[in-house]
Amino acid sequence: MDFSQFENEYNLQQLELIIPQGHSFQMWVTPRFKNHFVDNSYEEFTSNIIENLAQNIDLFIDIGAHYGYYSLLVGQANPNCEIIAFEPAPTNFEILNRNIELNHLKNARVVNQAVSNRNEQVNFNISTASDNCAFINHPATPTFKQIIIQSITLSELLSGKKGLRTLIKIDAEGHELKILEGFKDILSEVDNIQMVLEINPECLLLDKTTPKELFTTITALGYKSYFLDEINHQYFQPSDNGVETWKTILGERKYLNIFCKKVISSTNLLFISHSSLLAGAERSLLELCKELFTDYGCMCTVVLPSHGPSEELLHRVGAATLIGPINWWCKGGDPASEDEKYKNITESLSWLICNQSLFELINPDIILTNTIVIPWGALLASVIKKPHIWMINEYGKLDHGLNFFYSFEKILHFINESSDKIVTKSKDVQNTLFPDLKPNRVETIYQFIDQPKIDNQNPNIKNYFTNPESFHLIISGTIMPSKGQEDAIRAAIELIKNRHYQVELILVGYADPDYQKYLKELVENENVNDFIHIIPFMESINSLVQSADIVLICSKKEAFGRVTLEAMLMEKPIIATNSGGTKEMVIDGKTGLLYEPGDHLKLADQIEKIINNPELRNTLASNAKEYAKKTFTKE
């Protein structure tokens, strides 16, 4: 090995100030670690997990803190969290201390001690590599000196903090079992401690411990372990004592991180998603995974049909992902040919069968399907014998005009027979699709979303409304016939050409190319290009919605409009179709105005009414926000 790379490992004169990739905090590092943190995203999967857990904890204990990367990450995510960082190596401790002060973490303290199973003076090895300092002579780099330092147990420290929601990160180069022994009484007694451990089998053996002993101890303390695969952003549960699973996942790598949570409060969920984009259903699933993980510690794996924008965002909220051919058992437009049906079914089914062992390694407690358009979650649950929940977020035929490969009656029968529970997005979906099912089989759970954030300071935000004097209308969502954008365009044309109002309309979202072409031709033929703008999908449209005067919801039959709820929370007046789940959100004359789908003249009347009545406009917007806050709650 070339040891020249370590020549400045303990040289405080050679420190560099960096910003770790993907974060905004600064930290001092010696030259070798610039590659770790700047050129690469350091332990990205573990970092995402810890960052999200940090938002809902009271105490973070960082054992083997080194330069304090994870302490800084937690401090940024939750400034109110108490942080205790242990680092035995004197120079590392000095750099750690500087980083805590640099980032003004007032609730953090650093401790120049080692954590073990006894309170005593001990020999501690300072390795050639500063991140390999340990009780053992590290197998990767030689020890260049030994120091005497105080070791302590966590038992006394935690005895007065049993009520705190606690996250402990342990990176102790093989000493993990002894650290756990030092507070196993606390671990056995309380249920609110979560842990992330870095495990290196070679180091464990040098510290006279085996992986089997460690995993047996973790299990005996009432914990469930999840092995974190940094490369693939996945996690796995051992079904045995952990050793064989560990060997399978470790492969050629020297170490892996594991996340440990009490069995009593641990739930492992597997979601099957029909899309990797960021339309309403995908955004709702993203927020659900974030809430489940951050607030409840539920592990979430999402199976996606392809790489796409939702994949990275799922990683950011601590979810794992798996890519596979999740084909639909239906098709929009013309019915599918027999060849299409055969290909879609056999490709997905074959993939599930070939990867059965992988799903058994993930070992979910529950499998959830996030849409009516795919059956694979139900089939997988049957094969690996897990409970299945089917989340029905759409009508299928009535809203999107989908042609299913089998009769719709058979589709609904299969959904009923293959689900332990059916969850619908609105009462209208429940009453329309499952009118005869008992409440213990089907339940409506309304969606909750946080108050939309508006970034008016972002210089990259463009104002797509070109005339400040005009009345601004917006309709957002996938541009397709079932979303009714034609109603909005024809109403705008009526107001502009026949009623002589200054109005400007924006359509924004993913687009069905044929329908978008049809709408563009309609706009061009009526010569209203200056007043009606069709723009591509935007990841965040909150600032654009904020600049509108009215939000239009023109869907022919919407199960539950996410954009409707966002507009209500943003206190915007809404005009929507009198159909589907929208009627459960927009109460005509109170929280918005309604019109019948396809009646663009009535839509124009309702727009005109709001233009001419500022008091009504303000009342509708205020009532909508109050109703949304009261009705569509997190609870």
Image: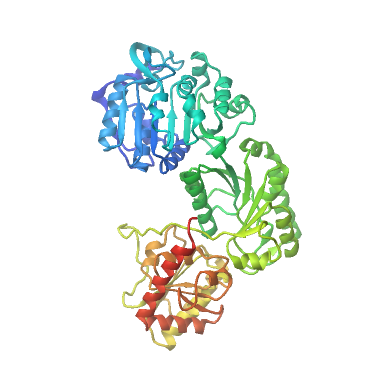
Residue at (33, 28) in percent of width and height:
67
Q: Is residue 156 left or right of residue 274?
A: left
- The residue lying toward the viewer, choosing from 630 and 307, is 630
Task: State the scheme by which the image is colored.
Answer: rainbow
Q: Residue furthest left?
A: 13
Q: Is residue 404 left or right of residue 524?
A: right
Position of the N terminus, as image quadrant, is top left
Q: Residue furthest bottom?
A: 498
Percent position of residue 497, x then y: 43, 86
How many numbered circles are shown? Answer: 0
Is residue 594 visible in this depiction of the protein?
A: yes
- The residue lying toward the viewer, choosing from 42 and 337, is 42
Is residue 372 visible in this depiction of the protein?
A: no
- The residue lying toward the viewer, choosing from 107 and 259, is 107
Q: Is residue 410 placed above or below 20 in the rendered structure?
A: below
Percent position of residue 156, x then y: 39, 24
**Picture quadrant where residue 248 is located:** top right
Percent position of residue 552, x then y: 47, 73
Q: Is residue 428 placed above or below 146 in the rendered structure?
A: below
Residue at (41, 43) in percent of width and height:
55
